[in-house]
Amino acid sequence: MRLASSGFASRTEPAPAACHPFDRLSRGQVVGTLIGVMLALLLAALDQTIVGTAMPRIVAELQGLQHYAWVTTAYLLSSTVVVPIVGKLSDLYGRKRFLTSGVVLFVAASALCGAAQDMLQLAAFRGLQGIGAGFLMSMAFASVGDLFPPARRGRIQGVFAALFGLASVLGPLVGGYITDHWSWRWVFYVNLPVGLLALGALLALYPLVRPAQRRPVVDYAGAGVLVLAAVPLLLALSWGGTEYPWDSVLIRALLGFGLAMTGVLLWVERRAPEPIIPLDLFQNAIVRVSVLALVLMTSAMFGSVLFIPLFVQGVIGTSATVSGTVLTPMMIAMTVSSIASGQFITRTGRYRVVALGGLGIMALGMLLLTTMGPETTNLVAVRNMVVIGIGLGACMPIFTLVVQNAVPYPQLGAATALTQFARAIGGTLGVAGFGSLLANRYPRAFYEALPPTLQAAISPAWLAQLENPQALFRPEGAEQLRQQLAQLGLVDPALASQVFEALRLGLAAALHDVFVLATAVVFAAWLSVLFLREIPLRSSYTTAPQPARGERTAPLAPDGIEQPAARPQRDPAAARPDRDAPRR
């Protein structure tokens, strides 16, 4: 790789040929660059939570309730799909241009979102904003891999993971304050000063490093097929069981087309000189296990984060404002645990024991959730969430670090993007799977909790209208339920109380099944980590990653930077350096 001329390149002394370009940076340049990267990551992390609080006010002003879901869906689709593409491109062309482009795109899209005049415009601009967020998410974690070798990277990954926890806590609070005291448009405009500050730091301090390749080959076909595969699958998982039944023609068509395109993607990537998703990454057992554990862990995380407020508000009977703060202790615990986990890994180099311990604690927290019932108090719910937060936080910095340590440096961007893609897919699977389970389990649980006398007195058609648990989440829900029963001629207040109690018991039973499934998913993640092989964390970029049993090591290039094993060269006449390379 080579360090291109930039504003600070002239101030650095020439390094030996075997020195990695980022090793030439002064401490001040590293700190300044890291601050710029963290500000960029904060933009994307906050935006995932800050907008949700303002959505009711946005819909009230812009109308277009039918397009409500697209504001979130467009952002999810674009931010997820772009991650592996930009990750691979950064391996070919360097990180700086994609990181700064992501900040510019995100800030510009934020300004457009703030100026949107209707919901369709807002959805389109949110899609554009999601592309910028995908750039930032992928490049931020890859940039940490550039700035610090694996042996020193744990504490920084822990801080970055903690940043997400803080964003989850601050996002709703900041979003609510801005919406109430200024305008919902400032939820988007607030990104502008932070983004410009991050952009200034990145332009001034982030080194312009380009890979030492004469003519990078871009996998345009792979990028196109990846979009055709991921978008239908994500749409099917987002809409299935909520917007449309799982057995509807549309969901089946989306799933079928997405799976077919996934097969085409595998065929294309096997033949591409520089595939967007290098399939040889999956020949590494450490990468396979880490990606599987990430998908399972993230799926289970959504099984708790999304549905605990439903339990607190609908079953325990806490107000919406208080139920929203129940997650705060969990996020604080996750933040502290992430930082401590990163410090421990950096000091000891041991990551497998942390992953097993973290997932074990998280499984214990999920198991505690399954013991909650109608008599559970807020304090018990908070205790269980804190246990989950401790376990989840311990695991957050691990798997990206593990994958980065196990692959050659030229594949750092693609490998890092793969972990972020796995998180996104896991989150989507969690929302779809647990949401579908709740939707299917609740009606049956409601009827089981309803007294037989009421089932005989109320027609099935009216029962279907009464089974909606929304009455549990509104202060006036009980009164509205009495009015519905009065229309049937059932004016006895005790009957309304019985129906209301059946709604509460039904929701508790349905959420119990959700928590049981989430516990099983976390346990599956714990089992997968049993197969995670621990190798020493590299103390420099020029040390080849140790292979798993039966794998070949990647040879080092003359400049000391690892080259991917068994990768075809750009020049057909050039020799393949790994063909006869001795084992190291």
Image (tube, grey):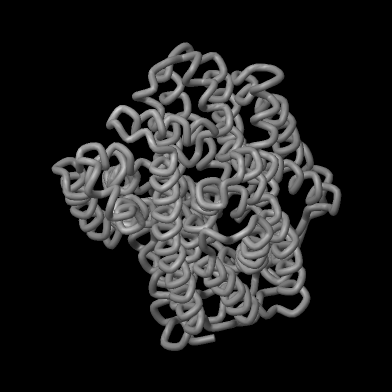
Q: Residue furthest front?
A: 492
Could you tell whether 45 is left or right of 252 in the image?
right
Could you tell whether 499 is left or right of 355 in the image?
left
Relative vertical location of residue 493 with respect to residue 267 in this rendering, above or below: above
Residue nearest the observer in this picture, 101 or 241: 241
Residue 572 figure quarter: bottom left
Residue at position x 65%, y 50% from top?
326
Residue 66 figure quarter: top left
Residue nearest the observer in this picture, 20 or 70: 70
> Does residue 455 show up?
yes
Residue nearest the observer in this picture, 496 or 358: 496
Residue at position x 38%, y 18% from top?
64
Residue at position x 33%, y 50% from top?
439
Residue at position x 61%, y 65% from top?
388
Instruction: Give x and y (percent) for residue 523.
Output: 47, 76
Residue nearest the observer in this picture, 193 or 374: 374
Instruction: Give x and y (percent) for residue 46.
Output: 63, 39
Relative vertical location of residue 527 with respect to residue 32 in this rendering, above or below: below
Instruction: Give x and y (percent) for residue 173.
Output: 69, 36
* Image quarter (top left, top right, bottom left or bottom right) of the C terminus: bottom right
> Does residue 220 show up?
no
Residue 262 figure quarter: bottom left
